[in-house]
Amino acid sequence: MENYSMTILLDSPAEKVFGALTNNIPLWWTEMFEGIPNKQGETFTIHFGEQVFKQFRVQELEPNRKVVWYVEDSLLDLPDLENKKEWIGTTIIWELTEKNGNSEIHLTHLGLHPAIECYQVCLDGWRQFTTSLKSFVETGKGSPYLRSQESATEIPQ
């Protein structure tokens, strides 16, 4: 089964993209963040309100080239999902290349494929937050999930 992957082109150097993935996650993904994302072997957790969280272990860091996160724990407590822990055991790989001061991210989510229940919800979430990442890296302003959204009816990936 084919894993989810996408390519994102950015008007920004790889160093800035790497910094966003390792030091600035609350500024583009979710402000409900805790942990250490910039050191191999460490863990960090992101939350989207009370019903959705993901705990990652940083598996690999190659400055300005690659970031790999392994999902150790997860909950997608959404009404339409029976399996609320599908992300556990999946791996997220961010591969960066730079040419003439611009970057390309190749994002692969190993274990996220069309056969799993949350696929469409997760696809929508990845699109939303990679757009936020691009905006953050290019303009300094992302669109992360905010604590004030906890009472909203729609919860992102």
Image: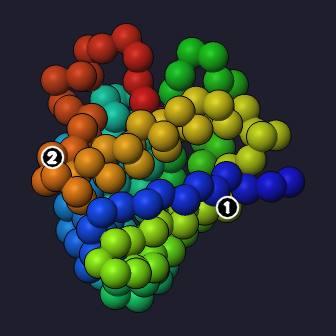
Q: Quadrant of residue 2?
A: bottom right
**Mark closer to the chain start, 2 or 1:** 1
Q: What residue is drawn where x is 49% and y is 43%?
A: 126
Q: Is residue 21 visible?
A: yes
What residue is pinned by disc 2? 141
Q: If the image is split into quadrants, where does the N terminus sit? A: bottom right
Q: Is residue 132 above or below residue 105?
A: above
Q: Amino acid at mark 2?
A: Lys
Q: Is residue 102 above or below residue 112?
A: below
Farthest-out residue, front: 100
Dot 1 alpha-carbon crowd within 10 angstroms: few under 14, some 14 to 19, many 20 or more? some
Q: Amino acid at mark 1?
A: Leu
Mark 2 secondary-structure assignment: loop
Residue 66, image x and y in percent?
A: 45, 80
Residue 1 located left or right of residue 19: right
Dot 2 alpha-carbon crowd within 10 angstroms: few under 14, some 14 to 19, many 20 or more? some
Farthest-out residue, top: 153
What residue is pinned by disc 1? 110
Q: Give the camera-side residue of 138 and 52.
A: 138
Count of labels shown?
A: 2
